[in-house]
Structure formats: structure tokens, C-alpha cells
Image (cartoon, rainbow, N blue to C red):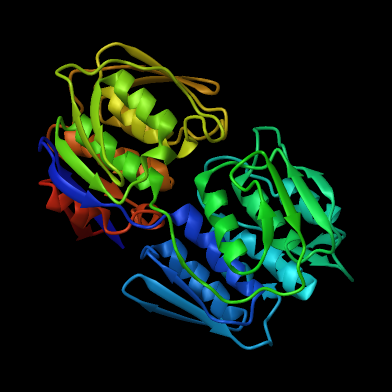
Amino acid sequence: MDKLVIRGGQKLKGEVTISGSKNSVLPILAATLLTDEKCVIRDVPALRDTNTMFRILRSLGKTVELEKGVVTVSGSKECGWVADYKLVSTMRASFCVLGPLLGKLKKAQVSLPGGCVIGVRPVDLHIKGVKALGAHIDVEGGYVIAHAKRLKGAHIYLGGEYGSSVLATGNVMMAAVCAEGKTILESAACEPEVADLGDFLIKMGARIKGHGTPIIEIEGVKKLHGVAHTIIPDRIEAGTFMVASLITDGDITIKNVNPRHLGALLDKLKEAGAVISESAMSMRVVRKKQLRPVNITTLPYPGFPTDMQAQIMALMTVTPGISVITEKIYPDRFMHVAELNRMGAHIQREGPHAIVEGVRYLSGAPVMASDLRASACLVLAGLVAKGTTTISRIYHLERGYENIDTKLQSLGAKIWREKE
């Protein structure tokens, strides 16, 4: 097992190209289960999570081939319907095979999911949605077992305790495209990744309107076909490199990024002192002389993304003044606080709030990654800290960032891997 070693203090400069979106590609790969025909997907990032999804698809009878970021998925009509515990339990997003299996085969057995330890993330909205379409659900032995003689369109409210759910919206969409009649999803997730999935399904022959808005209308069809599709850029990776430029007082040009997907983040970074120059699919990020504290509240899209909460906290640790960061999506998503404090940060947690008092500098220290975005947060802290930081359990980082260490090296960071 590897660890990352970072010698801080380097101003990052240069250009970096953002990979395809992790949160977009996983449900799109799952959606290939809806057809027996070949699907070609471009800009697929090389991640632990994409590799896990490849293994799940293969276990269900699909042939998956990968060459230079292009994935070809094909398979015979004899598709399996049991998604194995050993695979699904390692990655929450793999639960999204439930919808397409149910839509295509009218039956599915999918392990309850795993993934990052950032608090309880139930699958109740997924189950609520497919039940409304006519599926019978049992939960036995750690599996969700679903079957239906037929699926029928319905009006489904998908709002949850903490707002809409991206994965649940995707799962129910993929089941509904094969249901009889019209389905209306109300309080659907509006994230760009949901819109990308909708675009993919439409290319396959689905009839969908309103994807990327709170109300999605789906008219069921009998059959879907193979397609070619390019994944949207990863807005969270782009945001992470934006913060890397600011926290190191650097000058980074970020390529293959869609600024329209980053509205709330751009607003807060500009408030904090960022100077951002935008073009069609790139951004240059520098900062004014002095950073300023900002208050952040995470919300469903188009609000401030929970997946950028940890990274913005790293930036605020070295920003003069006091910032308050409120987590409204996953209230327990503060595993990184203790590790940042080990590096000299002054952060106090009060329920769903983290109160950050900026310090003059962080100090390098041995720290441990607890989840994907916390890992990125610790990398950012290590880039600006005095001395050397070692980050263990970086397999979390590898779940969502393609070659982040080599990308940072190309910008001038002193970062490398060592064996634990």
C-alpha cells in the first residue's frame, strides 16, 4: 500500500487538464445494462471506482474493454441480475445498477452499498422510487431484492431529509425509461451529472424531458440501443485544482472545465480573493494579495457542493479571520477536521458547523485519509504546510482523482509516493 509524501511551500504554476467526471461516468456505465448493443464511452477516468464498476459489469455478463480513456461495453442477451456483495459493498455508486437491471430484466438483487465513511447515507429514496414504479422489494442478508411483472409510470416525489439525491434520481430514471406510460420525478436532483446521464439515455432512445431540473418527465419505451458518448469534465477535480492555486498563491490554468457547472464555488472563491479568467472550457486562477474568510453552507446543486467542503476548509485554515462552514448534506462529513488540527489548524466543530480560525501557517505531519474528499483536503494542506506531510490510506484518493500526484508534479509540487 502506498502513501503520499508532500514537501510544502511550492507555488504551483502551469496548466492542468481535468479528467472526465467520476460522478457522471459511474451511473452511465450502469446504464449500459439497459441494452444488449455496444456502447462506447469516452473520457473515462482511470480510477478505483471506475475499475470497480467494470468488474461489476463483467460479473453481470458484459464485456468491458478499455483503451486510453475509451471504454467499450458490449454483451450477450444473457445478463446476470445479482450484483455481488464483495464488489457493491466497496462503492456506494455501484448501487445504481438496481435501476437498469430492474428496467431491463424486471428483477435485481443488489448488495447494500459501501464507500466512504462520512455518515449514514440510506437507500430509502431509491427503494421508494422503484416501489412506486411497481417493484416488490425485500431486504434480506444484506441485499435489496427487487422484482416486478411489469413497471408502470408514476408520479414520484424524491425529496429526502437533506434534499434531493443524485444516485436515487439516476436509479429511478434508469428504471422508468423502460416502464409503461409516463413517469414524473418531482424534487429530482439537478446536478450536471444527472443531466449527463439523461443525455446518455436519450441517445439510447429514451424519452426524457427536464433532466437537470427539479421535475423530470419520462415516457417509457420498449427497447434501448447502443450509443457513443463523451463524459462531462469533473467539476470537483476542477474545483480542487482551483483551491490548489489559491492555497499556494500559484497561477494555474485549468483546461477541460465547464464554468457553468461551478457557479456557487466560483462565487465563494472570488469572495475569498480569487481572480478567475474564464474562456469556453478553461479557467486561469490566481489570487489577490490577501485571502479573505468566507462562510459556506453546502446545499444540493446549484448550491455549494458538499464534495468541495473539505477542500475549502483547507483553504480557510490559512486565511486570516474566522470562517464558518456548515454541512447540510452529510452532517457527519467532518472527518478531516482532526487531521487538519494535527497540522496546526484551529478548527472547532459545533454540530453541523465547523468554525475555522485562520493561522499563519500549517506544519507538515503524518495524517490519515478517511474518505475521498478528505484525502484531497489533506493534499491541499500538505502543499502549503511547512515541512513534510505524509498521507496514508491514499486508496481513498485514488477512488476519485486520476493521477493527482503526477498532475501536481507537473505544476511544480514536491509530491511523491512511498510504500507504507
Q: Residue at x 22, y 34 (%)?
A: 285
Residue 362 x, y percent position in the rendering: 21, 27
Q: Looking at the picture, does residue 260 appear above or below residue 372?
A: above
Q: Decide if residue 107 is on the left or right side of residue 290.
A: right
Q: Decide if residue 190 is on the left or right side of residue 263.
A: right
Q: Residue at x 35, y 70 (%)?
A: 69
Q: What count of labels does the image hold?
A: 0
Residue 114 x, y percent position in the rendering: 58, 55
Q: Looking at the picture, does residue 240 appear above or below residue 205?
A: above
Viewer-proximal residue, 12 or 225? 225
Q: Residue at x 54, y 81 (%)?
A: 38
Residue 327 x, y percent position in the rendering: 52, 27
Q: Decide if residue 140 is on the left or right side of residue 283.
A: right
Viewer-proximal residue, 386 or 302? 302
Q: Residue at x 79, y 56 (%)?
A: 130
Q: Is residue 410 at all visible to an observer of this figure? A: yes
Q: Decide if residue 161 is on the left or right side of residue 191.
A: right
Q: Looking at the picture, does residue 147 appear above or below residue 360?
A: below
Residue at the far top: name it: 321
Q: Looking at the picture, does residue 107 appear above or below residue 306?
A: below
Residue 420 x, y percent position in the rendering: 26, 58
Viewer-proximal residue, 34 or 391? 34
Q: Is residue 369 at all visible to an observer of this figure? A: no
Which quadrant holds residue 239? top left
User: Quadrant of the image for the N terminus?
Assistant: bottom left
